[in-house]
Image (cartoon, rainbow, N blue to C red):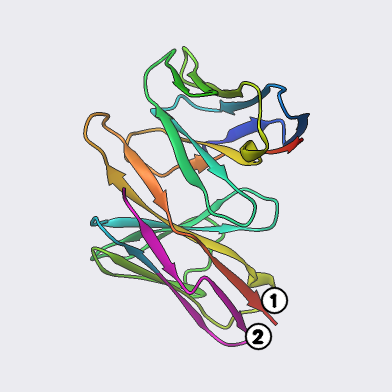
Amino acid sequence: GAVVSQHPSWVICKSGTSVKIECRSLDFQATTMFWYRQFPKQSLMLMATSNEGSKATYEQGVEKDKFLINHASLTLSTLTVTSAHPEDSSFYICSAPRRLAGPSTDTQYFGPGTRLTVL
Amino acid sequence: GQQVMQIPQYQHVQEGEDFTTYCNSSTTLSNIQWYKQRPGGHPVFLIQLVKSGEVKKQKRLTFQFGEAKKNSSLHITATQTTDVGTYFCAGSRSGYSTLTFGKGTMLLVSP
């Protein structure tokens, strides 16, 4: 089946530093990928839509200069948290849609997530 | 904007009891998807419903999509401890648009 990987799986960094998270679709191409953030015991909140070959689309309230997204290829999207602060500590999850034969809809395949802790 | 509400937020059952979580959208949906997230894990796709009034079954899990395509439910018959996790519904207004997730229902099953 479709697999989406994320790297790193966890990261601890100092306040003020930047952290890059990679999301890869391993056996299919994804022109679009989604980045979510999940705080403990809460639901997934969509942060932005990453588009291959064009700028990312950010959800309302998400700072595009703080959360830099680059969709470098059809199988790779990166999220860089710049000047991280403790309030940025969260579980960051990416997903890539895959269009299955039959229903005219996409199925989302989620990466394993990256747990970011900012000290 | 589109809102997806899910209830209950939490349910604790004894093994063998049934469990149901309900999902309601403020707008008509093109499709609804259900995901399960185990503690410490990531969401895993369970099923997708597309047609009005659709009912799908996966072993002990029964998924239903309302006639108006604005609500859905997931019912687990005779829960097992392996069913523990948070169940999310997610809807989209068109087949290829972004998903809006409900807040999830956390299920705890005691042996």
Q: Residue furthest front?
A: B111
Picture quadrant where residue A27 is located:
bottom left
- Which is nearer the eye, B46 or A52? B46
Q: Is residue B96 left or right of residue B35?
A: left
Q: Chain of mark 2?
A: A
Instruction: Check disc 1 and report its element: helix, strand or loop.
Output: helix
Q: Identify which residue is drawn at 23% across, 29% down.
A: A102
* x and y, in percent, of residue A54 in the image: 27, 65
Give the numbered dot on residue A11.
none
Residue B51 is inside the magenta segment: no
- Which is nearer the eye, A117 or B86? B86
Amino acid type at mark 1:
Pro
Q: Residues within 10 Å of mark 2 (few under 14, many from 20)?
A: some
**Residue A40 in view here:** yes
Give the numbered dot on residue A15.
2
* x and y, in percent, of residue B99 in the image: 45, 42
Distance from label 2 to label 1 (Cα)?
Answer: 7 Å
Q: Chain of mark 1?
A: A
Start-end of magenta stretch: A1-22
**Residue corresponding to mark 1:** A86
The disc, 2 or 1, on the residue closer to the chain's N-terminal end is: 2
Amino acid type at mark 2:
Ser
Q: Identify which residue is drawn at 42% across, 16% down.
A: B54
Residue A7 is inside the magenta segment: yes
Question: Do callouts 2 and 1 mark residues in contact (Cβ within 8 Å)?
Answer: yes
Query: In this rendering, is residue A29 above or below A117?
Result: above
* x and y, in percent, of residue A81 in the image: 52, 76
